[in-house]
Amino acid sequence: MQRYFIETAIENARISGEDARHIERVMRMKEGDQIVVVAQNTAFICTIEGFEGDEVMVESTGQTIPSPELPIQVTVACGLPKGDKLELITQKATELGMFALLPFDAERSIVKWDKKKGAKKQERLQKIAKEAAEQAHRTHVPAVYEPVTFKQLLQEIDQFDSVFIADEEDAKAEKRTRFADKLKNEYDKKSKSMLIIFGPEGGISRKESESLLQAGAQTMSLGPRILRAETAPLYALSAISYEFE
């Protein structure tokens, strides 16, 4: 069944905007057809009651679908990458269970966030996250935040039960700290929130790495190979899913 997110309670369920047009004009659904409506992080099986202007009226059948969300809320912080890599990270990380995306202006970021076009870009990324969440049958749409400075990122660390940084110097070391072992510790501690930090194409700088470690972050080894900026977050999320799910 098609899945749609609403911001109101299920008792006041109305689907509007692009989703309503998709139901009526693309899917060509009619009264009596059933869809899945996600309200307040719960997926309800609903019946279409009618069409009114640009809105679709639905009513819950009382049936719900179990949540597929990760048992730990993982926020991905990534140094601003080049091109459309941020869109790729948004889409694929959402499919893999990311809770939120926090881009930051890293020392080695070549791309700078255009404040004039920033709102539209952020809106586009949020739309990509929503569509990916629908496709993955999730009950939560990851929030895509406006990029922050590295100093602001440091200030966010205390909000998480655990913080990891992907440092390519760790991958080059003969003796690496296994990410699987560290994840097992977080699983045993029943951690509820995690921040995983990745650099842009040039990686995390030595200065940034030292500041993050001093603030309480841990390094994580993603294997002996150096991964691209858009690949590393997906690798880490897959490892987290394997350990926690």
Image (cartoon, helix red, strand yellow):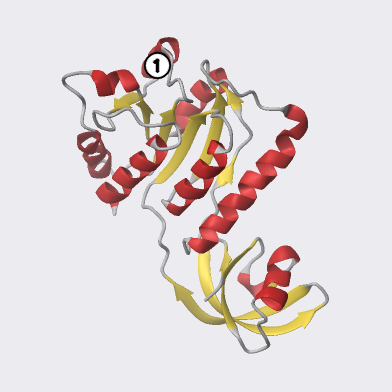
Is residue 41 shown to the viewer in this render? no
Work out which residue is located at the far bottom of the displayed protein and give it: 32
* Spot occupied by residue 231 in the image (x, y as percentages of width and height): 40, 38
Q: Nearer the viewer, residue 84 or 55?
A: 84
| Residue 128 vertical position relative to residue 87 in the rendered view, above or below | below
Report the number of discs. Answer: 1
**Residue that label 1 marks:** 209
Position of the C terminus by quadrant: bottom left
Q: Residue at x 27, y 39 (%)?
A: 186
Q: Is residue 90 above or below residue 38?
A: above
Q: Residue at x 53, y 74 (%)?
A: 44
In this rendered view, identify the residue nearer to me: 99 or 115: 115
Q: Position of residue 128 (x, y in %)?
A: 59, 51
Q: Does residue 119 appear to the left or right of 88 in the view shown? A: right
Q: Would residue 64 be found to the left or right of residue 115 on screen?
A: left
Q: Residue placed at 47% from the left, 48% from the top?
A: 92
Task: Say above or below: 50 vs 75.
Answer: below
Please report the residue visible at 38 percent of the width from the left and 53 percent of the height from the top. Answer: 70
Classify residue 14 by image quadrant. Answer: bottom right
